[in-house]
Amino acid sequence: MAALRKERVMEMRVLITFFSQTGKTRMVAEAIREELGEIAELKELSDTEGLEGYDLAFIGFPIMAFGPAQPAREFLERHAAGRKVALFVTHAAPDDEPALQDWLENCRAAASGAQLAGFFHCQGELSQAVADALLASDNPDLRGFGERRSETLGQPDEDALRRARSFAREVIEGL
């Protein structure tokens, strides 16, 4: 039985595609690729024309404006319906941020037409440009978030990347 499963996995065509602003979502994509090895193809979202020909697509992006980054949202709307996808999301919020669950739900909702095979998230790095924009805001909550940029430096850490590799393995095993 295990040999048949491994043979089926080796026949799969898996895409890992991502949009990354600071390079941190790319790090997660590369960790997933490292775990999956030769069955997976790694491409930036801007170089991905669609999901045709793939059995599974891991699609990664940062949260921006409380949901998926616009390029990812548009890609999901155009290409994910009816397809088997696993999302991996980076965000600048700590896991105990009260609003984080709403933001993650916005990401899931963007892929509502897809067959969601898995969902992973971890803290990434708030870019200096976004932090500067937040710091210039009239909204004290947004300014406070911009002031916390230093807490995001060095994320995702090795533990998050280990969890990303484990996530990839679990998604494949669950198919």
Image (spheres, rainbow, N blue to C red):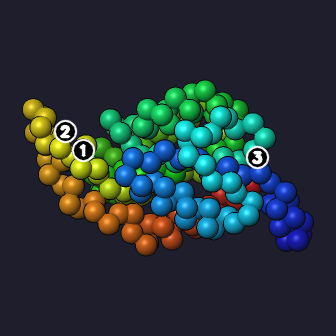
Q: Secondary structure at mark 3?
A: loop
> Real-space Cα distance between discs 1 and 2?
6 Å
Q: The residue under label 2 is which amino acid type?
A: Ala
Residue shown at 63%/53% (left/top)?
42
In the rendered image of this protein, does residue 88 appear above or below residue 130?
below
Left or right of 80 on screen, residue 14: right
Q: The residue under label 1 is which amino acid type?
A: Ala
Look at mark 1 in the image and give the residue it sits on. 129
Is the Cβ of the residue at disc 1 closer than 8 Å to that at disc 2? yes
Look at mark 2 in the image and give the residue it sits on. 133
Residue shown at 30%/44% (left/top)?
99
Nearer to me, 147 or 5: 147
Nearer the observer, disc 2 or disc 3? Answer: 2
Q: The residue under label 3 is which amino acid type?
A: Asp
Q: How many marks?
A: 3
The disc, 2 or 3, on the residue closer to the chain's N-terminal end is 3
